[in-house]
Image (spheres, rainbow, N blue to C red):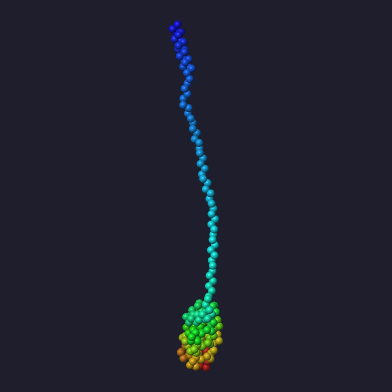
Amino acid sequence: MRRVAAGWAAAAALGACSAAPTSPGPTATTTTPTATSTTAPTTTATSTTATTTTATTTTATTTSTRSADQASRDLITAASAGDLPAARAALADGADVRTTDGEGATALVRAAYGNHLDVAAALVAAGADVNHKDRTTQSAYLISTAEVGDDPRLVELTLAHGADVNAKDRFNGTALIRAADRGYLQIVDPGHPGRGRPRPRQLPGLDRAS
């Protein structure tokens, strides 16, 4: 009987173990990382159109304000100095080539005294009188034969523009007499070796003097 009772007791203990609930272990939680998509801020490039300002170049028009009388006086000054650009500017401003200074000299007479050939040529081209005499009875033609040395260029210029070959100075001397008196052979003698070339015109009276 005791064996049977012990068997039942063992069976009961075994059943109790089988019936006992199994305690569940900790549940592993799988955390799936959520990928957060960060959208980069969109930078809107604002195209700034550069406005090109066109610089308007204003050409300053220089208008001479000097009067014709002033231009005429300036012409004489320029001729005396041999300043060709200034002489041309004065002519452009209406200078009168017949205007005289305090000694009765025109711009051409002043240019002749300085042997300023280029200025003299510009004045002659503008209508200057090669025969006008100042108060000392000197014209551009007479000056060219005796007052500028043995240089025939001014003589040739005046002869080519109507010089009065019979003109006389205050001592009653002609151009030929004046040049000969000073020994200017290149002016008196067209065949003189110092000229280097034949003179287009010779002084009237040369044949009689030879």
Query: Is 39 rendered above or below residue 21?
Result: below
Rendered location of residue 63, percent (x, y): 54, 74
Q: Position of residue 210 (x, y in %)?
A: 50, 92
Residue drawn at 45 percent across, 8 percent down? 5
The structure residue drawn at horizontal position 52% and vertical position 43%, both measured from the top left corner, is 39
Q: Nearer the viewer, residue 104 or 107?
A: 104
Where, by quadrant of the figure, is residue 2 drawn?
Answer: top left
Q: Is residue 186 among the parts visible in the rendering?
A: no
The picture quadrant where one finds residue 92 is bottom right
Tell me: residue 73, above or below residue 30.
below
User: Would residue 8 be seen by someone viewing this image from the given angle?
Assistant: yes
Residue, x 49% and y 89% (percent of image)?
135
Return the x and y of residue 46 as percentages of the image width and height.
Answer: 53, 51
Query: In the image shown, does 92 or 148 lie closer to the viewer?
Result: 92
Image quadrant occupied by the N terminus: top left
Q: Residue at x 44, y 9 (%)?
A: 6
Number of labelled discs?
A: 0
Expressed as whole percent of the image width and height from the top left, the position of residue 97 reads 53, 83
